[in-house]
Amino acid sequence: MLFVLSTSFAQQKIEGTIQDSKGNPIEHATVLIEGTSIAASSDEQGKFSLTSTQNQATILVRTIGYLPYKQNINDSQKSSQLRIILQKDNRNLDEVVVSGTLREVSKLESPIPVEVYSAKFFRANPAPTIFESLQNINGVRPQINCSVCNTGDIHINGLEGPYTMVLIDGMPIVSGLSTVYGLNGIPQALIERVEIVKGPASTLYGSEAVGGLINIITKTPENAPLFSLETFGTTWQEYNLDLGGKFKVGSAQSLLGVNYFNYSNPLDKNGDNFTDVTLQDRISLFNKWNFARKDNKTFSLAGRYIYEDRWGGEMNWNKQYRGGNEVYGESIYTKRWEVMGVYDLPGSEDFSLSFSANGHDQNSVYGDVQYTADQKIVFGQLTWHKQVKNHDLLTGLAYRYTYYDDNTPATTEVSHTHLPGLFVQDEITFHPQHKLLLGARYDYNSIHGSILSPRVNYKWNSKDKTQVLRIGAGNGYRVANVFTEDHAALTGARDVVFEGDLKPETSWNTNVNYVKKFYSDNGSVFGIDASAFYTYFSNKIIPDYDTDINKIIYSNLDGHAVSKGISVNLDWAHSSGLKAMIGGTVMDVYSEEEGEREWQMLTEKYMGTWTIGYNWNRLGLSFDYTGNVIGPMRLPILGADDPRPDESKAWSIQNIQVTKHFQNGLEIFAGLKNLLNWTPTKGIPFIISRAHDPFEKIDDPSLLPFDPSYVYGPNQGIRGFLGVRYNLLR
């Protein structure tokens, strides 16, 4: 009897319920007894039950998206029902994303791999523009395209900027002519997060989303601080100011943001008599309204205006020389406006109307070559979302109208392009662990005719949701307009030649993505996010710099092009305050024509990024070390007589920062950018060809032509910065 009683006592059950802070049950949480193999999983009601053979035991509770929980259990507690409350883990483990499927879903549940970067991530290396901020994201590289005016674009997995679509709150605001300039002037204090999709997204977004998309999500007035300020300056005399605030008018809430950037200090540290960095004077205004409606229906309206005056050139240039041939300068005036909104239609069905419009006016000169352009885009999209059993249906009608006019010979008359489209998507849940996404889009381009873009994606996740596997394949297309996308075509340094009528580019992409999270008992989390990608292009338009050093020849590739590679991100966060995000991408991007393979110009073989931080909470200090390393890339030299190397060496930009946090919402930050003082001029005779004679007035056939296109990284050395950040929450 004593033996039976003692055995039954030793095997008493430990039972309880696992909930979040709001009392909602948490399913699939793992409960185990420390030091043993005894474990259980919570059910749909959050309940669990396991048997202990110890007089005293320690239970551990872990699940993705929540902080680990540990509790000591004695004999008296074994017979009682435990109520365990898990706290949300705010370390970017299970964010809500919208870019993959055009609706809000958990990042974990999205069949499309979406990378999410919070505003806090970008504060580790403060920058005046999103363009510069993206330099610490693996697989994404801001590319400088001109050593004089410093305009650029965004490369994703080695594909040039025209293949990347940039959205603001899901609207195709930054596209076409504005790709070069549209990433400047977005008030960073108003940015909630940035979502990045790598690979074709044409099924949902149409043309330009061939290489991927960047969706800049702004804060809602409800979640924004009452007042926010961020300002900093550098030792190069760059000054940036971000102001934000919210207010209420009746039942509507409004968010207002202002960005101002100024750099007026010409420097020539490489001694070529040209400015190392473009001088800029830019102001941007952003205003967003949310209107309260019945049944939690959405009505949001936002607008932005940006004006920028930038110039670069010979050190003695001023505006009296603008457009002349005495002193060389590249001067660009940009005026741009944008309006965007979302309106949920009344009724029980889930209909939503998204709309946007923008105008971009550019007045620019490149030496004595003038380029003026006017672009207007109107976009509208009606979507219908419906859940039928295990089918999550999304269908939509879209229309985009583009007006474009410039003063180049390529535009003999005003261009009017109409692009109506229809898309449908079905997300099928076969099992809580298995999802299949099927989608297709049909567009009719008024110039190029019918275009079809299908895609299929599959997602599997483990029961405890610590592992996710995604496999996808899709089609993308792009209708090219060279003069809106390629700065080298505008400089006047080379003649632009078109061979035949340019046809739309098409691509087929496959990718595999695997995510794994590891949790330790001490509260640390380690994550692996690995992807393999392969994209095959036909009709690709590749500028030819090599056939004639005085020309840029554009034509459709009579062959194919390929972008393939592997990308890995490692993410580690420790309860002590130490955290790290380290990533690397190895890629091979090339074109093949008539049996000859050619490495794509200005595309690296590999890249790496890192963001390492430590929070010293007791002293209110945080430390950040960020950087990247970019592998060699092929460069556009001017023939065999050009002494500049045709391939760059690997290079790295590294930054450090220390921030003091005060309890009243005030932060003071300081640091160094470009610690290694790297610039493209290291180890080469010059960057700008024929800088001493940009208008080629010297009649000497032995001289190379003037050419500012030999540039591949930022031409700005080491500099210090000091700034202040303040948020008034209420």
Image: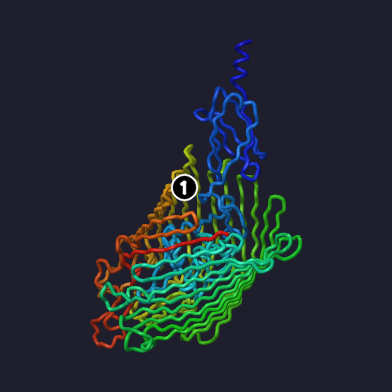
Query: As drawn, is 231 to the left or to the right of 341?
Result: left
Quadrant location of the N terminus in the rendered image: top right
Residue 444 visible to an observer of this rendering: no
Please name whichever residue, 157 or 175, is drawn nearer the observer in this view of the structure. Answer: 175
Residue 331 coordinates in the image, percent (x, y):
40, 82
Disc 1 marks which residue? 528
Determine whether 406 is above or below 628 in the image: below
Spot occupied by residue 246 in the image (x, y as percentages of width and height): 59, 66
Position of residue 372 measured from the top left corner of the image (x, y, whole percent): 47, 84
Disc 1 element: strand
- Residue at the location (33% across, 60% down)? 652
Amino acid type, callout 1: Ile
Which residue is drawn at the image coordinates 25% and 84% (left, top)? 701
* Residue nearer the viewer, 704 or 23: 23
Quadrant of res 402? bottom right
Q: Position of residue 705 (x, y in %)?
A: 30, 81
